[in-house]
Structure formats: structure tokens, C-alpha cells
Image: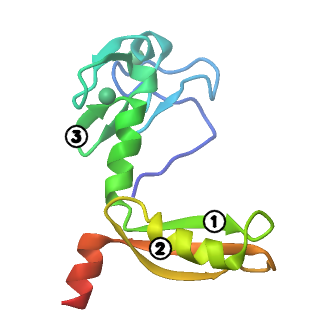
Amino acid sequence: MQHVSTKGPAKCAICGEVETQPGSFPNVVGVGRVCLTDGMKKVKCEACGNEIKLLTSSKLQGRTLCLSDHMKEIEKFRQHLVTVFDEDNETAQSILSRAYSEAPEGYTLLTVRRGRNSTHVWEAEYEKTEVFQMRCS
Ligand SMILES: [Zn+2]
Ligand SMILES: [Zn+2]
């Protein structure tokens, strides 16, 4: 277990420098807290090849990624997606058919249901098609 404490100064994950003011070192996902000198250093995104500041990068499964590639990777791991429709804007009929016809790429519609504690919000739940097929075969 990694214990993240908000109290006490953090140590730079790269050079080991200790911050002078608690909370002044920014956190880089997958790397840890880094000093500003290291944070401004350029790193290369391993997905698109763009040079980015370490500060705006993140590390996912050992790969350095820019923010947009990080989001894409995260998306790949997401097995479920929920899209929200509002009956105030369109009819339930239209929501139902749109939920089906506008399924995100690679996802299969599981269910369309009323949003919790709401009389006009609908939620369409999708499951990653590969997962869906695995479960159904
Ligand atoms: Zn440092
Ligand atoms: Zn990138």
C-alpha cells in the first residue's frame, strides 16, 4: 500500500529534493510528486511522439503519455459507458432509438433506464462489445 500523506513535505520522485512548502510539488500521475525543475523538463509521449512537460504527462503501465493519449488509454480500459439523455429535450421514443443507434463505437447497448431520483433523465448503459460477446457466448 502506498501511503499518501498530505502532511509534511514531499520528496521529488526524480531527484529526491524535498519541497520547502508542503503541497508545492505537483503530482504527476504514475510518477509521484516532482519538483518544479523536473516538472518543466521535456518528456516524449510514447504514443504520439509529442514533446510535453513532465508536469502535463502521466505514466500508465510504464509508458509516458500526454494528457490526450492518457485519456484514450483510460477509455480502452473502461468496460462500461453511460450516456445521459434528457426527456426535457426530446421524447422518450427518440431517446430510446437514439440510445440504440448512437451507441459509441465498440460498445453494445445493455439497457436504457430512468435516471435515479429523476423524472426526466434517462441513462443508456453500454458495455464494451468484446466483453459483451465474451459474456454471451
Ligand atoms: Zn526533482
Ligand atoms: Zn501523446
The earlier-in-sequence mark between 3 and 2 is 3
Task: Tell me the SS state at disc 2.
Answer: helix
Task: Kindly identify the residue that appears in the image at 65 percent across and 79 percent down.
Answer: 93
Residue toward you, 6 or 70? 70
What amino acid is labelled 1 in the image? Val
Labels 2, 1: front one: 2
Task: Kindly identify the residue that appears in the image at 56 percent across and 81 percent down.
Answer: 112
Task: Tell me the SS state at disc 1.
Answer: strand
Which disc number belongs to residue 62? 3
Q: CA distance from mark 1 to mark 3?
A: 34 Å
Which disc number belongs to residue 128? none
Q: CA distance from mark 3 to mark 2?
A: 37 Å
The quarter of the picture where residue 119 lies is: bottom right
Residue 44 is left or right of residue 83, and the answer is left
Q: Quadrant of ligand 1?
A: top left
**Mark 2 sits near ligand 2, with its Cβ under 8 Å away:** no
The earlier-in-sequence mark between 2 and 1 is 1
Tag 3: Cα neighbours inside 10 Å, few (<14), some, or many (≥20)?
Answer: few
Task: Kindly identify the residue that appears in the image at 53 percent across and 71 percent down.
Answer: 99
Q: Position of residue 68 (x, y in %)?
A: 41, 34
Q: Quadrant of the N terminus?
A: bottom left
Tag 2: Cα neighbours inside 10 Å, few (<14), some, or many (≥20)?
Answer: some
Q: Residue furthest bottom?
A: 137
Disc 2 and disc 1 in contact, CB within 8 angstroms: no
Labels 1, 3: front one: 1
Task: Kindly identify the residue that appears in the image at 64 percent across and 21 percent down.
Answer: 21
Q: CA distance from mark 2 to mark 1?
A: 13 Å
Residue toward you, 2 or 108? 108
Q: Please, is residue 39 above or below residue 71 in the view?
A: above
Which disc number belongs to residue 100? 2
User: Which colouring convention does the figure follow?
Assistant: rainbow
